[in-house]
Amino acid sequence: MTPRTPHDPPALVLVAHGSRDPRARIAVEALMERVRELRPRLPVHLGHIELNEPLLPGALARLGDAEAVLVPLLLSPGHHVKHDIPGAAAAAPARTRVAAPLGPHPLLVETLYARLAEAGWRTPADRATRRASAVVLAAAGSRDPDSAADTRRTARLLAERIGVPVVPAYASAAAPTVPDALRALAARGRHRTAVASCFTAPGRFATQCAEAAPGIAAAPLGDHPAMARLVLHRYEQALTTRQPHPSRAHRRRALAPA
């Protein structure tokens, strides 16, 4: 454990989902380095919910009783954001705050647009081509209605940015799937379609959604500079938002009647 001084800012702990795809770890570490470049004096750590080391409980244990802000590298609320991450925070000796997930936010939309442009998407200038165009926003999916609501909001923000309809679709646990959304768009005469990747890093779901694209498929969000700025925004936001101590909040949820 690194010795800390009273003047050190609270540590930032990036909380990644974890993946068996080795590209995911590379992408998350690249994003972590971008965050460090923007804030060189800020201690930045990494913890995973599953599948990869370090797992979040171990990463928090190594902080001792230091202050830390956990920033989920997740794009909408769901079980991991509402239960797994607060649970790990409550069990840790560190004095923690849990930031909001990364989406929805204009910086997320900026990254989605940039990744689409890198993949070859160009917003059509003429009305006829716009009527034939659409984008599918591919996300992981969750049974949590708040997750679907936030993904729909991200889709609306992206649609405002690119000037054509954006339809949210999911890799699991929610409907429609990406292939179903693409078929529905084609049935409405929108054959010029692209898939935007609302995934932080490569992995099975991101690959599966990209493979369904008839043409343009954007890369995952990765270490785009806007993502690093968004991580730091969520960190600062958590520091200025009054929060219950995670152990007390988690205990209240555990004791609440079903």
Image: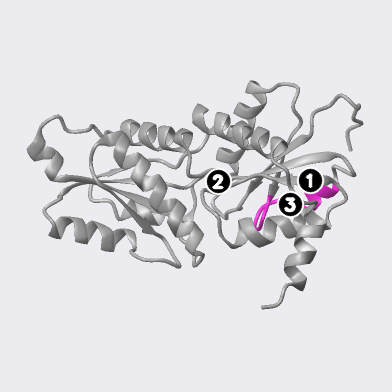
Residue 253, horizontal then vertical, whole percent: 72, 66
Residue in view at x 51 percent, y 64 percent: 144
> Of label 2 and label 1, which has the lower sequence position?
2
- Where residue 246 sits in the image (x, y, percent)? 78, 54
Q: Earlier in the sequence, mark 2 or mark 3?
A: 2
Instruction: Point out which mark residue 96 bears.
Output: 1
The residue closer to the viewer here, 248 or 32, is 248
The residue under label 2 is 24
Q: What kind of residue is marked 3? A: Leu
* Amino acid type, callout 1: Thr
Within the image, what quadrant is residue 26 found in?
A: top right
Q: Which image quarter holds the N terminus?
A: top right
Count the numbered circles shown.
Answer: 3
Q: Answer with mark 1 or mark 3, whichever residue precedes in sequence.
A: 3
| Residue labelled with disc 3 | 56
Q: Are marks 1 and 3 in contact (CB under 8 Å)?
A: no
Q: Nearer the viewer, mark 1 or mark 3?
A: 1
Q: Which residue is rendered at x = 28% and y = 35% of the image?
A: 162
Which residue is painted at 68% across and 23% down in the image?
Answer: 39
Q: Residue at x 80, y 48 (%)?
A: 60
Q: Amino acid at mark 2?
A: Ala
